[in-house]
Amino acid sequence: MQFLRRFRYHLLTICFVCAGLLLTQSDMLQKLNNVSYDMLLRLLPIDVSDDVIVVAIDDASIDKLGPWPWPRNVHARFLDSLSRFNPRAIGFDVFFSEPDKSNTEYDTDFGNAIRRNGRVILPIYAEQLRLGGQLRERFPIPEIGRYAQNFGHIHIEIDEDGVSREVFLRAGLGQPIWQSLPLAVLSSRAITLPIDTPNTDSSRSTDADTKARIWVQSQPIRIPFAGPPGSFKQVSYVDVLEGRIEPDQIKNAFLLVGITASGEGDRFPTPFTQDSQLMPGVEIFANVISGLINKFIIRDASTLLNQFAAVLPILAFMLLFQRLMPLPTLVLAISVIGSCFLMSYLILAFWGTWNSPIPGALIICAAYPIVSWLRLEETVRYLREEIDSASLIREDVYHKHSPSIEVSLDFLKILFSLHSWDIIDRNSAIANGLSQDSSNDEIQKIDRHVPYARQSVSIELTGNRAVRLNLNKDKFFSDRELKLAKKILRQEDLAHLTNSPKGTEVVQRQIHKLRDLSQELQSLRKVNENSLADMADGVVVLGEQGNVILINKRARELTGKSANEDVVNLHAFNLFNCMELLDSTNWETVLRDAYLHQNNISVTARIEQSQHVLIQITYVGDIDTSPNHVVVTLSDISELREAEKKRGEMLSFLSHDLRSPLVSVLALIEVAERDSVNANGENHLKRIKNYTKSALNLSEQFVELIRAEIVQPDSIIELDLAEIATNAVEHIWTRAHQKQIKLKQMGEMDGCYIHIDPDLIERALVNLLDNAVKYSESGTEVTLMINSNDKGYTCTVSDHGCGIPQEALPKLFDIYHRVSNASRDNVKGSGLGLAFVKAVASRHNGAIFVKSELGVGTEFELFLPRN
């Protein structure tokens, strides 16, 4: 199949190349070639030579000197006026083939002026006296022509579309002996030309005279037009005649004298003038002289170059399109067509050679729909085969695994509390179902598509069957319920499909089938994606090369990948490198066991310091089959680990801190019982009282800590935070007074309303103030300040106590943790107070911060958000 496909494209390429070669040799595209040439020529930046000046016989000259033609003595005076300007050559695009009708002596005067000037080139042309008659060459009359320095033919070629695009540098009857007027003007001054112009003897042989007189032309060039009419510098004939021209304007210039006046002289359409004014012949010759001086003339490309320029884009398109999709293929076709024109433009601009882009571009325009049709044919054939295969599999699955329509109806009966249902065969008008009062009259009432009653609806099935659903009295189908019922029944009814859906033609049928299969695939895909996306555990599916091919939202969170970050095809080692395995193993060993031995693996990993993850790895598939995948499940067990940690800390607290004072109480009671003399009884009771108070205080702090961690929403109310702070200050005032420590409340004193649990916040402030008093020296000051901003309130408790070491600050709020400091070892504490404050801050979505310096004091900031 692949060989046939390649053979077909190779055969097409050969056909396109042969067609392109034929078009380069055909004249069928001449009009298109001319249009493309005119378009590209107008884009060329062709310079205008300053040495070429047109002496225009314009409207002003005719108004001044009278109607054309003028007496020859006017031209004599004109040439004498030019003598003082010393022009390099003077070419006349004006015929002098007949004597002056006003006075023949003027011809002699004009001839003498030509002799005195010595730089005049006169025109000759071919004339046909009657239609189909012989051609003859017309020369200036002898009185004028005998003194001319040279002659030049003024024939301008006209293409089939009536536009002048080229001239022949040599032409003549029988043989091309005469130079064109521009070439004759330049040759008279020995100008170096960009072409080889061999001199030809102007004398004709006897054989040439006896031959049929035909106009023979050679050395064709395309006219290098520099722009529309008026592109060259012009001076008026009458201004030269009357001496109104400065010598520097035309000194050492090539002058072309011709008619530009309206209604006089010859005018031609050019690539620049087809839709506007025509160009006088004298300006056309000025363009040719300018091109020859600037060494830029345009010639037609050789046959070999034309063929190469046509074949190259065809081969490029046929080679590249097979590797591209449809849209890039269209872009390629447009680009190759554009390159044809670009290549023609560059060859024209840099080498002065014209090769048409039309043959190559036209073949590409024809090749694109043909190859696109072949692609479409292959695609449709492949889709038809695959869709038919998938349809067979789908029908087989539905027949094997889909429940019957009766099972679906039983489900609907439970779902909607149906009174009854009927399956109706319209061909036999037989109703089967749970209805106890079905009749033919009722069957006829069933509409094909529209329910005839909201209590009883009809739903069409395949095979000219219908289902009628009947609700109990006083119950009606809602639109949502009706839509769901139709979806369930029509989905189940797919099990009865045996024929492929039919359309008006084959492509439409394939599209219809593909749409059905695509909808089923999309539905299944959504089920899979939604199931994975909403899982509480992270799921990562690895491909056979260990690359990520699927990852859900939770897995991204656990691996530190954002929702916008592209992790598909990321290697497993790079994805899981943020997780430190805790089971004395590494990821290399784990993945090796999963891929090579297909073991189910369960390991524990740590993310940073606080988060722990249970990783379960399962190999899906068989090593002998493909494709196979590895499924990695990530379960966050941080709360479980934290609970285990708290359980251990609680057991430690119960076994040591809470148990120690109780053991001391029992020991004192036993000592008191053994003493026969009760001299120390009062002392024992005092100790027992102290130990009991210590145990009770620890129990109360422990209970408060548990309560802070499980705060209930109904305990949150709106209160004035300043009032709660005042209560906390009053609560601790007695203890501060005993140590001669001054308490100050500062900042906002009222109107600080916020939603909080007042008991917990007050207890947290009491703990902070109690610690400040406890670790401060007598005669110092403890301050409670409340500040607010747009985000919330900050309660700051500051003291001038002994301070806390910097290394102890990170664990300051850990439960049961006490700072070891020689200056405060005599102060008793349980390690629960600051843990309680942190728990309260967390439950209110707030935070607790601490700043301390040894020997200076400590400052705690409790932040509570407004919401």
Image: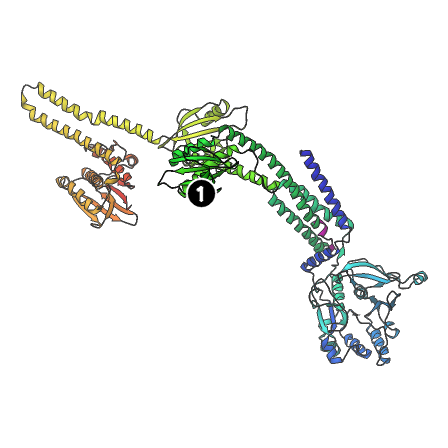
User: In the visual, does 107 lie left or right of 421?
Assistant: right
Kindly identify the amino acid type of the residue bearing the numbered disc 1: Pro
Category of crowding for the residue at label 1, using alpha-carbon neighbours closer than 10 angstroms: few (below 14), some (14–19), many (at least 20): some
- Picture coordinates of residue 703, whole percent (x, y): 21, 32
Identify the image quadrant of the N terminus: top right
| Any part of residue 576 in sight | no
Please give left or right for residue 374 compared with residue 625 in the image.
right
Which residue is pictured at 33% across the width and 31% down the height?
639
In the displayed structure, would residue 655 be above or below residue 567?
above
Q: Nearer the viewer, residue 246 or 754?
A: 754
Residue indicated by mark 1: 451
What is the quadrant of residue 421 in the picture? top left
The C terminus sits in image quarter:
top left
Residue 16 against residue 219 in the figure, above or below? above
| Residue 289 lies in quadrant | bottom right
**Image coords of residue 419 (percent x, y):** 38, 35
Q: Nearer the viewer, residue 225 or 378?
A: 378
Q: Is residue 646 visible?
A: yes
Magenta highlight on residue 356: yes
Q: Which residues are magenta?
A: 352-360
x, y percentage for residue 575?
46, 33
Residue 407: x %, y % from top left: 44, 30
